Image (spheres, coloured by chain):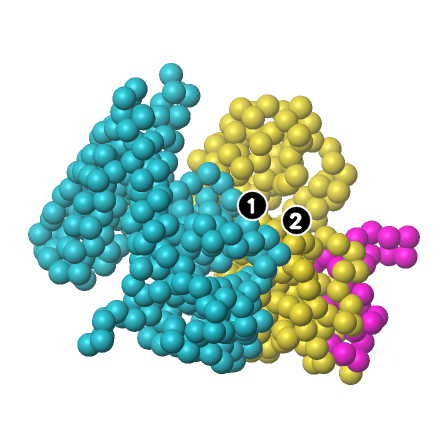
Chain colours: A yellow, B cyan
Amino acid sequence: MTLTINGTEIARSIRSRVAQRVAETAATGKRPGLATILVGDDPASAVYVAAKRRAIRQAGMRDFHRHLPRHASRGEVAAVIDELAADPDVSGILLQLPLPAQLDAGPLIDRIPVTKDVDGLTTASVGRLARDEKGLRPCTPSGVIELLDAEGIELKGACAAVVGWGALVGRPLAQLLLRRGATVSIAHEFTADLASVTRTADIVVVATGVRGLIGSEHVKSGATVIDVGIHRTPDGLVGDVRAAELDGIAGRITPVPGGVGPMTIAMLLVNTLRAAEWDSARAALSV
Amino acid sequence: MTLTINGTEIARSIRSRVAQRVAETAATGKRPGLATILVGDDPASAVYVAAKRRAIRQAGMRDFHRHLPRHASRGEVAAVIDELAADPDVSGILLQLPLPAQLDAGPLIDRIPVTKDVDGLTTASVGRLARDEKGLRPCTPSGVIELLDAEGIELKGACAAVVGWGALVGRPLAQLLLRRGATVSIAHEFTADLASVTRTADIVVVATGVRGLIGSEHVKSGATVIDVGIHRTPDGLVGDVRAAELDGIAGRITPVPGGVGPMTIAMLLVNTLRAAEWDSARAALSV
């Protein structure tokens, strides 16, 4: 029998622990705050940002939000980031992607100080992850690790296949898995024989953006399958995995929706809390 | 028949091309220069630094060298790095590792500006590699890629196994191979069944520091085997691979010595040249 990994419930438990911690520290000191920056009016981005802000407020954190017009210049966005970077009440800064076409995301992201980089996407954070140093890790791959931990799946010595080598999920996830002692294989669009890579893995994580890419021919009996994909179809949301085919084959699988999705927001709250605590620790050290 | 990859010859050809380019640019402008910093009197480090300086001079570049005493403080080393960082004649800075025990390497390495980081080890360079952005890449893994290219081995779509997940070779090499379109599996000390990872690979790169770890049971017929290991024995230098066992099995193999070793210095020269050209490009842009 294939078990379903209940990401909604695991995320809820993490969010409740974050809220508790926020309540404790708010009594004695400062309340963590997240600043979200939305440029333009992309409907999907607006929905994501609204969900993040709601979660931040529900956790008892401060919600700072900046909405810039679609035609905002590089300088205007940079000025907002710099102002938030300098604001001691702002623990974390999130620049919602994608940006409108006239803006180059890389240099703007890199204006976010490493201690406030709750998305973990700045060059400095990426370098700290690769060098195994203290830093904030991207939310979705951290959420995948949390799911595996919550299910009690041993990572040390396990064989993991990461399908998809994107900057947001695949690359950081491969490093997080390696850091935990997993043997990791990374497959992508140029991989000649995908099944040969995934079929030997105890853990298969799929983050390709290709709907229904992974099916029964790709997964060995008893493997844990984590589906990061999300696609809107007339029949509802589906992932990169043909989940129905894996019933009775996979040991555990994340559903879409209700698997990885809720974890991303939960880890954003965790990162905002970590950023606030990191910042306090730095302030205390510099006294 | 197993072909031997002649790293000495490939490195010589690269060094000669670098020297030619240095001669060309020296006629019209500035001569690239490398600053090596040696702290203490470790005999092996002294030998390595001497070899690097000799190669730099042979390529027609300027050789800056600083030797600090074994008990040098963090502040003393930092001051030397800062001075070299500010010197426009210094294109690249190399802090020879390991440092004496009282010095924490990470923060000192991070004082090297990203444009002068010829070892590619600063957080900024590591982040740029992980984000696929312009930057200087670590010499040994770049040298491995150059060897594979020189032998005409197709990387796109190839299956590569990287054995060893160290910061100097395994981690950056995995990223360089992925960037070139290889499917990459990374094995390390916690890998339960090493042969199952390496036996399916078209390219096996071994950088573990474990003498003779890889033998005939680990390699499929026709595979290319790159041995980054180097160990001094009464019978001479040997690698992480039991090379004699692979004769007639591997398609191509690097010898030890004369395989990867010479490439590291060749790529240091390439990086010094790139650093000088990057610096000129920046200077030109800021005019």
- Does residue B273 show up magenta in the picture? no
Outermost residue on the right side: it is A234
- Does residue A252 show up magenta in the picture? yes
State yes or no: discs 1 and 2 in contact (Cβ < 8 Å): yes
The x and y percentages for residue A147 are: 63, 68
**Residue drawn at x 70%, y 49% as measured from the top left:** A51
Task: State left or right for residue A217 relative to residue A12.
Answer: right
> In which chain is the residue bearing label 2?
A
The x and y percentages for residue B253 are: 43, 65
Residue situated in front as seen by the camera: B213 or A146: B213
Tell me, for residue A52, which label it has, or none. 2
Tell me, for residue A34, which label it has, or none. 1
- Vertical comparison of B2 with B278: above or below: below
Residue situated in front as seen by the camera: A180 or A46: A180
Residue type at mark 1 is: Leu
Tell me, for residue A263, which label it has, or none. none
The x and y percentages for residue A153 are: 59, 77
Local crowd size for mark 1, using a 10 Å CA cut-off: few (<14), some (14–19), many (≥20): many
The x and y percentages for residue A121 are: 53, 47
- Vertical comparison of A14 with B39: above or below: below
Residue situated in front as seen by the camera: B161 or B94: B161
